[in-house]
Image (spheres, coloured by chain):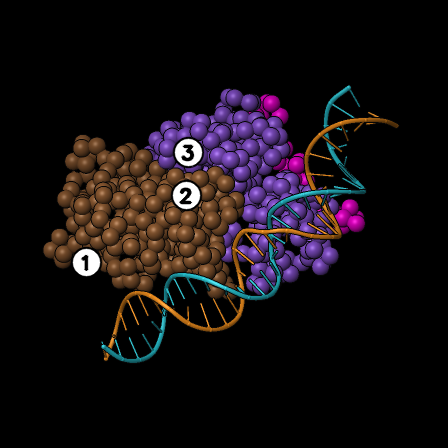
Chain colours: A purple, B brown, C cyan, D orange
Amino acid sequence: MLAEAATPEVSPVSFREAFSVSTEEECPAVTGARCSGCRLRPVCLWSGLSEAAERELGSLAFAHRRLKLGQALYRSGEPFQAIYLVRSGFIKTVVLLEDGREQVTGLYMPGETLGMDGIASARHASDAIALEDGDVCVVPYDRLEALSREASAVQRHLHRLFSKEIVREQRMMLLLGSMRAEERVAAFLLNLSERFTALGFSPSEFVLRMTREEIGSLLGMKLETVSRIFSRFHKDRLIEIEGKHVRIVSSAGLRRIIGH
Amino acid sequence: MLAEAATPEVSPVSFREAFSVSTEEECPAVTGARCSGCRLRPVCLWSGLSEAAERELGSLAFAHRRLKLGQALYRSGEPFQAIYLVRSGFIKTVVLLEDGREQVTGLYMPGETLGMDGIASARHASDAIALEDGDVCVVPYDRLEALSREASAVQRHLHRLFSKEIVREQRMMLLLGSMRAEERVAAFLLNLSERFTALGFSPSEFVLRMTREEIGSLLGMKLETVSRIFSRFHKDRLIEIEGKHVRIVSSAGLRRIIGH
DNA sequence: ACTCGTTCTTGACCCACGTCAAGTGCCCGT
DNA sequence: ACGGGCACTTGACGTGGGTCAAGAACGAGT
């Protein structure tokens, strides 16, 4: 049933096409690539640069790093050296309790930045794991510090990035501390919808890159509860769902759920 | 029973004495005060400055602002202008849901910094409310940006501050998403103990500045649950508690609770 | 000292979500 | 095409913590 409905209203190209890993020529695994031609420009760290500042800084170029599904970008305790801009693929961050329990603390999509948790102690405080094959832009922190001192546009952008992460985590705390399971799932779906929209894709139809267990961990509930709530939303004609493929049928309905 | 046991092993002066609001002479309400004489130096934003950098920057001085119990330092939606260093008193930050539900997202003690959530959108994303009379050091953000560009020690310190806040919130997400109520309360008490210790006070005996309801909101549970768990910990000889006065009898026992 | 309002404690009950378990289907490698 | 292992769904049941309610203790103001 979802198959028929799958004709995209908004996105003419699939997400995978648009944000697939670049060919070796335009994106070598280790050597840098000019920022000027980058398709992530509009969402990138450097997008705040005035042309003047950009000229002054010359040819920005950073190494890329490819990641395969399940591979770690960094792990908790590893020395902190760089922050990362997701170019393609999805990445989750996870913090662990000694006894093995884990909490997914973030889900990062192309254009989003992660790794800032490492600055405080010079070691990463979480694991970052690729949810599918993809690649990231590696921004060495010492270089970023220097740039940030030279160009106030970079500084402003970087500070905004920090602050955004703080605000995001505040919202997650609100979600985890004050909302019921059903509300959390609704908020999660609406949030994904917004972020896909920002990337130029359909607000109503997308593919979850996480398992039910990972979603549950992010939202502070068990995988069975996630599954049951997806089923209930489907029954109530708020969404259509087949495995990881979701279509939001009534975003208003989802919003109504959060309002109680 | 707590009264007899109250003789401080570690702190010779009471918290209130040491961190009370300064007299008007040394701490005027609006005009600045030199940082050089400040009693918060060891924990302050500027403590990372080398002597050279400090001389270069000349006489740092920032306005102070007094707060009475219940008063807001800033409110969600207000234009962002400064970040704040707590000088005395405790401050909570709160984020609200439209329907009135609220989540306490942070508890800030003297020496700690808050307000960074406002940078992203130029408006504060939470309310900051004084839990008792106290005062804060007002650090205008534009001035901080400039200082951060001029002195890399300030920059490094500021970035670490951002990062610490991100890590703190990650831990709160772990607490809210993966721990049972009993574990959350144990973790909360141990965390307070650590922070009081860092300020030079007894690790085992302190006064909660929040109501059971506020603690519950911070930890994602109802006030009755907080109360019941305090009572249970008391019965199990892990703590002694009388109203807001807590004494940790067995920190090892509390730690054991978190380990399951 | 007295009063009113807020905060805290405790009990009884209930429900949202976790746990356990069985069964299905999908994906991946051979 | 086949087999094995994950991922997912769904049901039955248990329980941690929420809800409701009553009373006690505290504290600020008069």
Which of the chains bears the disc numbered 3? A
Residue toward you, A159 or B196: B196
Q: How far apart are marks 3 and 2 (CA)?
A: 28 Å
Q: Position of residue A69 (x, y in %)?
A: 62, 30
Q: Where is residue A95 in the image (x, y as percent from the top left)?
A: 49, 37
Residue with the mark numbered 3:
A118
Residue with the mark numbered 2:
B254
Q: Position of residue B137 (x, y in %)?
A: 24, 51
1 and 2 marks on the same chain: yes
Region rendered in magenta: A1-27
Residue with the mark numbered 1:
B29
Q: Do the residues labelled 3 and 2 touch (CB within 8 Å)?
A: no
Residue toward you, A68 or D25: D25
Residue toward you, A32 or A125: A125
Q: Are marks 1 and 2 in contact (CB under 8 Å)?
A: no
Residue A67 shows in the view: yes
SS at mark 3?
A: helix
Which one is in front in this view, the residue at disc 1 or the one at disc 2?
Answer: 2
Q: What residue type is labelled 2?
A: Leu
